[in-house]
């Protein structure tokens, strides 16, 4: 069979090397065949054990990985389509109750007292008067039947309603050109989202789930629900909203989870 | 490119197993901590979203080079079904011949082409997993979110199976490893006629 003439690789020298080295070594290599397999298998096994001594948490490694994660934040901000809506679903597909997740178990949830609760406003907001739950309930609401995607890999369809976040920010005179919107929570959790996500039509301050007031484990009386972020970005039991240009690490990003966490 | 890819695949599979463990697809399958990359969930994720750049950029360079240089067309095609059967039968009887390292046999062609397609699918399903909303049109092709996870997982499984065979065969035909380290024999337009020594060596190999 003849070999067709083809383009020579740019990475290979034009001039042929002496093939005799390969030819001479062939018989030798063929001879140690079995030992080779054995040795190869052993070193492969050793390679898998390498992961046992984990270098991930070492400072220089973390520095590289977190730099890449910060780069991924920027890539995700570029990929973000501000007018693009997440798929929505029918009420029949809604899972009731929603799935619980927090940095502690459901038994350890400390319910928020709705009567004394106030939503505080801070940062680049013109009208910083606090809001009672009742005042929030009186705002026009929007309903979203969207998919909740957890970073762990599970998902479910949820039906959330409450005032649109953009509408709320406009109402209180927030600086919509600021970079971040921070959410401070009753359980000392903090989360923040980029302004583009805050202004997305499917970002709401949810007060209801499947038509009923949200129950304690799921963020009563107020939580963030946005269709374009992983579950952990959707802060529950929100007690303060801050609009700012200053970046500070949030609960999970401090521990190495990706900050942007867009889906 | 091959060895960069090997490192990337190693990172992607190890960290992927770590991520999988957080919410298993199959109740019976949980990857032991000793073979996953990353101690905590965030570390698995950090490695995965670091390795993806190496895997994708290196993969794009490889595909681009393979297509532009005509290497794929030349090396992987044509594939004749008859050759595939004959070579498979040979391989099963452990008659592996690499008289010419620069030539892939029919089974190699099928496997290499197949694994390139799996590589493409694992990136596409990965993209849909990462961005099911931004790329909702792409995600919709798969159906549900869990289907995307399953496809991504099955692609990984195919790559692991391929690797087992690939590494085992490379070890059985050690001269191919030598070639991989030295860059391989150069192919002239007309290959030199095999010498007597080469023929003898091949007969024993």
Image (cartoon, grey):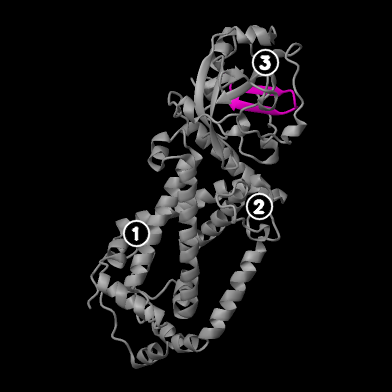
Looking at the rendered image, the quarter that the N terminus of chain B falls into is bottom left
Residue A136 coordinates in the image, percent (x, y): 63, 10
Q: Camera-side residue: A234 or B56?
A: A234
| Cα–Cα gap, marks 3 and 2 | 37 Å
Callouts 3 and 2 close, C-beta under 8 Å? no
| Chain letter behind tag 1 | B
- State left or right for residue A143 relative to residue A126: left
Residue B106 coordinates in the image, percent (x, y): 31, 71
Label 3: which residue?
A123
Residue B168 coordinates in the image, percent (x, y): 49, 74
Label 2: which residue?
B38
| Cα–Cα gap, marks 1 and 2 | 34 Å
**Secondary-structure class at tag 1:** helix
Asked if badges 1 and 2 are on one and the same chain, I answer yes
Residue A87 counted in the magenta span:
no
Q: Camera-side residue: B146 or B116?
A: B146
Q: Residue shown at 58%/75% (left/top)?
A: A41
**Secondary-structure class at tag 2:** loop
Q: Main secondary structure of the magenta part?
A: strand
Q: Could one spot residue B139 in this view of the protein?
A: yes
Q: What's drawn in magenta, residue-wise?
A: A178-193
Q: Could one spot residue A245 in this view of the protein?
A: no
Label 1: which residue?
B66
Callouts 1 and 2 close, C-beta under 8 Å? no
**Secondary-structure class at tag 3:** strand
Residue A186 counted in the magenta span:
yes
Q: Camera-side residue: A213 or A154?
A: A213
């Amino acid at each position: 069979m003849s070999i067709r003439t083809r383009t020579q690789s740019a990475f290979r020298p034009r001039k042929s090397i002496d093939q005799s080295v390969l030819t001479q070594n062939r018989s030798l290599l063929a001879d140690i065949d079995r030992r080779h397999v054995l040795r190869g298998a052993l070193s492969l096994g050793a390679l898998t054990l390498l992961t046992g001594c984990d270098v991930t948490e070492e400072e220089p490694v973390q520095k590289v990985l977190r730099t890449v994660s910060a780069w991924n934040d920027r890539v995700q901000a570029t990929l973000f389509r501000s007018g693009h809506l997440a798929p929505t679903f029918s009420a029949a597909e809604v899972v009731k109750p929603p799935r619980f997740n927090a940095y502690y178990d459901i038994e350890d949830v400390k319910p928020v007292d709705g009567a004394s609760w106030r939503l505080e406003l801070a940062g680049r907001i013109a009208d910083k008067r606090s809001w009672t739950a009742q005042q929030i309930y009186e705002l026009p609401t929007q309903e979203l039947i969207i998919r909740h995607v957890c970073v762990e890999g599970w998902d479910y369809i949820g039906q959330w309603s409450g005032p649109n976040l953009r509408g709320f920010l406009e109402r209180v005179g927030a600086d919509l050109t600021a970079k971040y919107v921070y959410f401070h929570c009753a359980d000392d959790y903090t989360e923040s989202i980029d302004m583009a996500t805050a202004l997305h039509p499917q970002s709401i301050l949810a007060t209801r789930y499947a038509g009923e007031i949200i129950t304690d484990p799921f963020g009563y009386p107020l939580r963030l629900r946005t269709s374009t972020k992983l579950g952990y970005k959707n802060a529950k039991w929100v007690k303060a909203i801050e609009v700012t240009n200053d970046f500070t690490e949030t609960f999970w990003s401090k521990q190495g989870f990706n900050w942007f966490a867009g889906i | 490119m091959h060895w960069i890819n090997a490192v990337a695949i190693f990172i992607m599979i190890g960290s992927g197993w770590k991520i999988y463990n957080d919410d298993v697809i199959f109740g019976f399958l949980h990857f032991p901590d000793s073979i996953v990359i990353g101690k905590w969930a965030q570390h698995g994720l950090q490695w995965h979203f670091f390795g993806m750049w190496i895997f994708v950029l290196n993969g794009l360079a490889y595909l681009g080079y393979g297509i532009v240089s005509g290497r794929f067309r030349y090396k992987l095609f044509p594939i004749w079904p008859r050759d595939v059967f004959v070579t498979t039968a040979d391989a099963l009887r452990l008659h592996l011949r690499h008289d010419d390292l620069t030539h892939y046999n029919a089974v190699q062609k099928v496997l290499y082409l197949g694994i390139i397609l799996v590589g493409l699918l694992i990136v596409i399903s990965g993209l849909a997993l990462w961005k099911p909303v931004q790329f909702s049109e792409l995600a919709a092709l798969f159906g549900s979110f869990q289907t995307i996870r399953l496809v991504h997982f099955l692609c990984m499984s195919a790559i692991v199976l391929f690797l087992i065979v690939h590494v085992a065969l490379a070890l059985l035909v050690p001269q191919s490893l030598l070639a991989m380290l030295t860059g391989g024999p150069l192919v002239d337009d007309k290959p030199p006629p095999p010498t007597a020594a080469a023929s003898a060596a091949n007969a024993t190999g």
